[in-house]
Amino acid sequence: MDGTPRLGHGFRFQWEPAQQCHVLLYPEGMIKLNQSGGEILARCDGQRDVAAIVADLEAAFSASGLRGDVEAFLAMAIEKRWLKLETGAKA
Amino acid sequence: MNAPAKIGPPMWLLAEVTYRCPLHCVFCYNPVDFAQHEAELSTDDWLRVLREGRELGAVQCGFSGGEPLLRDDLEILIGEARQLGYYTNLITSGVGLTEARLDAFKAAGLDHIQLSFQDSTKEINDFLTHTRTFDLKQKVGEMIKARGWPMVMNVVIHRLNIDHIGRIIEMADALGAEYLELANAQYYSWALLNRDQLMPSREQLRRAEAITNEWKAKLAERMRILFVVPDYHEGKPKKCMNGWGNVFLTVTPDGTALPCHTARMLPGLEFPNVRDSSLREIWHESEGFNHYRGTGWMKKPCRDCDHKEEDLGGCRCQAYLLAGDADAADPVCPKSPHHEIVSAALENATNPDRQTQPLIFRDPKESKRLIEEAEASESTS
Ligand code: SF4
Ligand code: SF4
């Protein structure tokens, strides 16, 4: 997967104290994210491309080989329109 | 009362900031006696309500009415709500919306606008024939999109417009709508007064659903369409408000807090006012919010029914309006002893010789007349 993911139109991502988790807010609803989902989405800022997000997560959690999991999550999030993947000469 | 042991936070704070409205929808969900409740909360009251709601854990904040644009402090309220971390939603007809106002909302951080469709019959005609209403929505729609908001539309569907549903979808597409909610009228308040004129027949509904499905497939790439099926026709009680005191906390223009915007009509229940109590007390401790939480209040047939957790016995207001008993099963349920009221209304919708009264349009004069009528019938009975 290549490109730069950014939040889909109308979605907002934030930490929610009352829920003790990251959430995605959108018109009329809320998705509660588990920890790894929250960590991935926190990095989908429209600046970092997929490779940078993976590298960042691997550094933050002193792990390696995360690419597969991250891509699977991104693919699911794109399908649900939480994210848009921008491809082309950016970032 | 066995209310659920643990009461979670409300997800939604619905701020009905005013009952004032330039429009006169025949299906309006405001109470028919709204003219009695016009003493509006001040800006400071609303700011406190917003803060308390957020502390309770609410994440979605909806500004509606009436027409919320008629509050000239709306941008202040939106700004505060956004600042507090709510996802902010404005539900408006767009009447009176200007570029300057939209800029102020944008600067305040408004997340989402839902453009709702008012149609008295005349306006739906205007809309369908490409005149005034269409032009207004088009203008407003362009202003909304130009500021980067998604274009979300809501149209109430009923007998008088349901046969034009394909045309309505086509028009919504021409306006660039990305999301379209086709909500069948629900029969409370003004819509109940007008039910005989508003309720479509089964046949009309079936056709409309089929046409909607065709359009769904055709427009799948650019527009999402949601068709909300009416409970009368489905014979299936809805889990009203997703559970009483479970998801929604509504604050009405005069500060009365309600589990749903029509609950005020239920007799014998006291609903607290935000002028006297905090939202925390209201949500967790008030009798009004606790009374119908969970399933402990139920009687037969709901009490012994396998579906009771699923639909929570349907809608309390509908039970009261149709069965005269707010503790009864929702009469749309075939197991309700009052179900024949619903079948008769449906039957009537297919009767070519049905008698109907003229439509009653929602306005303050009618509201006052209805208040007087209610008072007169109370003093004679
Ligand atoms: S339903 Fe119509 S009349 Fe009622 S508040 Fe909304 S716009 Fe106004
Ligand atoms: S009897 Fe009550 S709980 Fe059972 S389906 Fe009907 S309304 Fe729902």
Image (cartoon, helix red, strand yellow):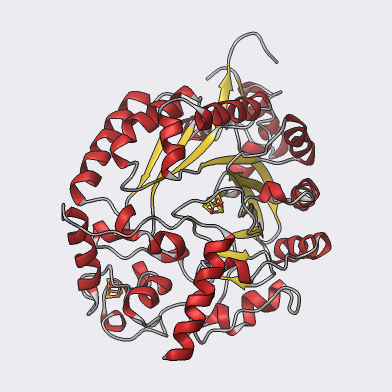
Badge count: 0
Residue B3 visible? no
Residue B195 percent across, percent down from the top left: 34, 60
Q: Residue B262: x, y in percent?
A: 50, 68
- Ligand 2 positioned in quadrant: bottom left
- Toward the top, the furthest residue is A89
Q: Is residue B9 left or right of residue A75?
A: right
Instruction: Examine the rendered structure and indicate whether residue B353 appears above or below residue B5.
Output: above
- B257 lies left or right of B316: right
Quadrant occupied by the C terminus of chain B: bottom left
- Outermost residue toward the right in this view: B44
Q: Quadrant of residue A91?
A: top right
Which residue is at the front of the view, B262 or B84? Answer: B262
Residue in view at x 32 percent, y 73 percent: B330
x%, y% of residue B9? 61, 67
Left or right: A16, with B361 as reference point: right
Tell me residue B27's x, y (percent): 44, 54
Residue B121 in sight: yes
Q: Nearer the viewer, residue B192 or B250?
A: B192
At x 62% / y 82%, what residue is drawn?
A: B286
In this rendering, the answer to whether B155 lies above or below B337 is above
x 57%, y 41%: residue? B114
When asked about the image quadrant of residue B264, the answer is bottom right
- Between B48 and B280, the one lying in front of the other is B48
Classify B370 as above or below A72.
Answer: below
